């Protein structure tokens, strides 16, 4: 699990989702554009939520480790979506094509 820190708050998400957000944030910044991303997360009570964040140039975002969770969700659909968005921005071909 990782915390994605954005502004004065942080959201708890899977390590894979946090890494995908960071890679996409780099691509968005390099492309000089912005995008709204709904990060799958859990609230303080452990209830699944989605947190919308704006990614763009000059928008600081970081991922920091959280306690390991044996029940960590994969968020594979979200990770795949951001990987595809990243490929589009960086001009890389899809590995699935």
Image: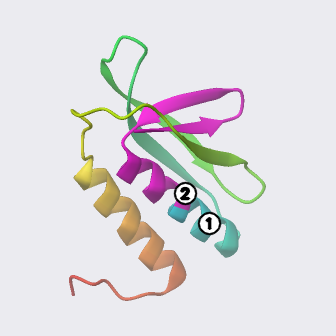
- Identify the image's colour scheme: rainbow, by chain, secondary structure or one colour: rainbow
Residue 63, image x and y in percent?
A: 57, 46
Residue 26, numbered circle: 1
Residue under the point 46% across and 71% down: 86
Residue 19, image x and y in percent?
A: 46, 56
Q: Magenta segment range?
A: 1-22
Bin the neighbour count of mark 2 within 10 Å (Cα to Cα): few under 14, some 14-19, many 20 and up: some
Left or right relative to 37: residue 42: left
Residue 49, image x and y in percent?
A: 35, 26
Residue 87, image x and y in percent?
A: 43, 77
The quadrant in which residue 4 appears is: top right
Residue under the point 73% across and 50% down: 59
Left or right relative to 5: residue 15: left
Bin the neighbour count of mark 1 within 10 Å (Cα to Cα): few under 14, some 14-19, many 20 and up: some
Assess whether residue 56 is covered by the magenta stretch: no
- In the depicted structure, whether residue 11 falls above or below residue 43: below
Residue under the point 59% across and 59% down: 25
The residue sitting at the top extreme is: 45
**Is label 1 in a helix, a strand or a loop?**
helix
How many circles with numbers are drawn on the protein? 2
**Is label 2 in a helix, a strand or a loop?**
helix
- Quarter holding the N terminus is top left
Quickly name the residue at label 2.
22
Q: Are marks 1 and 2 in contact (CB under 8 Å)?
A: yes
- In the depicted structure, whether residue 37 falls above or below residue 42: below
Residue 12, numbered circle: none
- Quarter holding the C terminus is bottom left
How far separated are the C-alphas under marks 1 and 2? Answer: 6 Å
Left or right relative to 93: residue 56: right
The residue sitting at the right extreme is: 58
The quadrant in which residue 7 appears is: top right
């Amino acid at each position: 699990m990782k915390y994605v820190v954005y502004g004065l708050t942080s959201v708890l998400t899977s390590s894979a989702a946090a890494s995908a957000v960071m890679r996409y944030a780099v691509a968005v910044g390099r492309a000089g554009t912005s995008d709204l991303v709904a990060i799958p997360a859990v609230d303080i009570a452990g209830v699944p939520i989605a947190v919308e964040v704006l990614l763009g140039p000059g928008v600081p975002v970081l991922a920091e480790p959280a306690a390991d969770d044996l029940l960590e969700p994969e968020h594979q659909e979200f990770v795949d979506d951001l990987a595809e968005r990243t490929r589009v921005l960086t001009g890389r071909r899809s590995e699935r094509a």
